[in-house]
Amino acid sequence: MSGNDPVLLSNTKEVQERFSEMIRETLTSIFNSFSDDSAFSGIDPYELRAKIGNLGFLPEEGKGFEKVLEETEKEIMPHLLRTWSTKYMPHLHSPVLTETICSELIIACFNDSLDSWDQGPAATEMEESMIHGLLGLFGFSADKGDGCFTSGGSQSNISAIIAARDWYCARKFGWDVKLNGLPPEYSKLRVYTSEISHFSMDKASHILGMGYNAVRKIPVDSTCRIDLGAFEKMLEEDVAAGLYPYCAVATFGSTDFGSIDDAAGMRKLCDRYGMHLHADAAYGSGLIMSQKYKERIGAISMCDSITVDFHKMFLMPISCSAILVKDRELLRCFELHADYLNREEDEEDGYINLVGKSMQTTRRFDALKVFMAFQTRGANGYAEIIDKSVGNAKYMFDKISRNPAFIAPVEPKLSSVVFALDAVDEVNKKVRRQLLSEGTVIGQTVKDGRVMLKFTLLNPNLEPAQIDEIVDRIEALGKQLS
Ligand SMILES: *Cc1c(COP(=O)(O)O)cnc(C)c1O
């Protein structure tokens, strides 16, 4: 043991006093590194790499907590990204509600795990209870449906695709994928999603042994939503060619534009062809908390499964996501009994073992964050947060649309605004880099072959006056760097 750093927490006063001190010192270091209101120090990547490289890897003798905290405060913390800053607006990467940071401390202090009841009694019951509530919130039956917390939208999406594939193969070919692996027809299975949907669908298809080519990309219309006519035509052609459409994914909030696919229209086609319909609502799920905007995702309950990310619009620490399914049988694809972990006899006696619903084994008690945030803010508090960010995006879009110096191709439905200075790509790129070095972090993407700047306005502390300021700064930089 080095110095007086306790190895573990315990019920003794001495350990608790020392640990409280460690927490206080950690907070002091964190706040010391919040030197101003910028999002980033602006350090260049080579300098930062050298700095980090100099920190060493594993010393022979431990330096003790205080010394390590000092180094971390000096060398690392100043260059961490400050997600709480209103000057941070590039990605679907959110600032976090203060109560959820406290949740993380609780989660870490106990370190319960969600694989079996005896590894997390209250954690298991709390996750089940939150899943119940979430099913109702998104319009699924809490009795018939089911769900599970995951590490993020990517894992929620792949979970849904596994469930859809296994369900389809059982129904269509009488084939048990869990037992036998992919069916002989595997190379003809197809999943449909928009051309601007999240890449986790391609990754999932590769990981599942079906490859990128099994993901059919449906063109989008001028509002960045799936072109239903094109989808219908694609299905007709593919079926005529002997392919097997097993799943479609409606995006509720595309990563760049926040566009929302017409899931009701997709539902009709999925029913016609006997397909699973998954809602990738990693981004847009937050709208469910808004009385004003929730009808924009109203069709979500028509889907068979839903990806919800709490570490985006819901403002919770990474990671926190869930997969919800309308029919609990769908999640059986992950069920497997191990003698040492989830004995069937325990489950008969009411000891639920959540490992049977998850791709993971050891799993974090992320549901606590959702519980504490929901209880702290209430429906009204959350509605205010979501309305503010959607309102800010509208404010920014309106401002940009009125200014001939800019082009803004798609009206936002969520909280992101994609636009460009009406100048060559190089100027837009330079503007973003210049802002980064000034501690203002904005995003960049491509639309119709053109470089675009992107704002994802998740921060409820952002005020319209600050939006005016940044838009004016971009316009000025555009002139300067042209
Ligand atoms: C962010 C995002 C994902 C991926 O979620 P992670 O939590 O980052 O794994 C998937 N789909 C959409 C639409 C997203 O915006």
Image (cartoon, grey):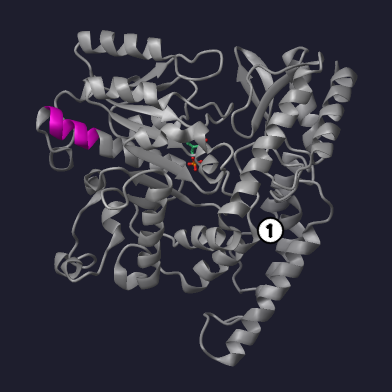
Residue appearing at x 17%, y 31% in the figure: 169
Q: What element carries label 1?
A: loop
- Classified by dominant secondary structure, the portion drawn in magenta counts as helix
Dividing the picture into quadrants, the one containing residue 478 is top right
Badge 1 crowding class, 10 Å Cα cut-off, few under 14, some 14 to 19, many 20 or more, is few
- Residue 168 is situated, as x and y percent measured from the top left of the image, at 20, 31
Front residue of 179/134: it is: 134
Tell me residue 335's x, y (percent).
Answer: 22, 52
How many numbered marks appear? Answer: 1
Residue 212 visible in this rendered orientation of the protein: no
Say whether residue 195 is magenta.
no
Note whether residue 413 is visible: yes
The quarter of the image holding the C terminus is: top right
Q: What stretch is highlighted in magenta?
A: 165-172
Residue 50 appears left or right of 363: right
Left or right of 27 in this view: 156? left
Residue 118: horizontal and vertical position, in percent? Answer: 31, 73
**Which residue is at the far bottom?**
13
Q: Which residue lies furthest to the left in this view?
A: 174
In this picture, is 321 found above or below 464?
below
Q: 373 or 39, which is in the foreground?
A: 373
Q: Residue at x 34, y 30 (%)?
A: 205
Residue at 22% of width from left, 13% of height from top? Answer: 239
When the figure is inspected, residue 367 is found, relative to residue 397, above or below; the finding is below
